[in-house]
Amino acid sequence: MTPATWRSLPVGVRVVVRRIRDDDPAPDEPPYTDVLGELLTVGDDGVLVRTRHGDVHVPAADIVLSKQVPPAPTRRPR
């Protein structure tokens, strides 16, 4: 998908956003990372995604790919 695709994602859906890493990865590490969660906002400056670990802002310039994904599976009780 092209970077413009993320602009058309509806707020409230579960998404995965592949982004350029904001740290300095070692030569043997991948240059990208994924952010998975509920899409909270979409704007010209990027997206805000609520992950299991908190809200993550992904700047527009860092978005490589994005797509809507199915809801998280229901956790089974132990």
Image: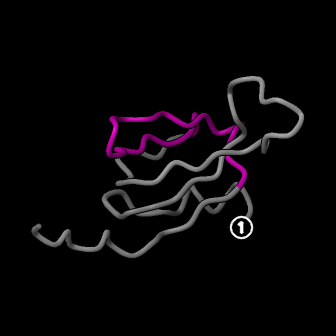
The answer to which quarter of the image holds residue 76 is bottom left
Secondary element at image label 1: loop
Q: Position of residue 41 (x, y in %)?
A: 39, 44
Question: Residue beneath label 1, please?
Answer: 1
Question: Farthest residue in the right direction?
Answer: 27
Of helix, strand and loop, which mostly describes the magenta segment? strand
> Residue 44, relative to residue 9: is it above or below?
above
- Other residues around mark 1 within 10 Å, as few (<14) / some (14–19) / many (≥20): few
- Residue 43: where, in percent of width, then height? 50, 41
Residue 23 against residue 40 in the figure, above or below: above
**Whether residue 51 is situated above or below residue 3 in the rendered picture:** above
Q: Which quarter of the rendered picture does the C terminus lie within? A: bottom left
Identify which residue is drawn at 48% across, 63% down: 9
Query: For residue 47: magenta?
Result: yes
Image x and y of residue 72, in percent: 31, 69
Q: Residue at x 72, y 45 (%)?
A: 32
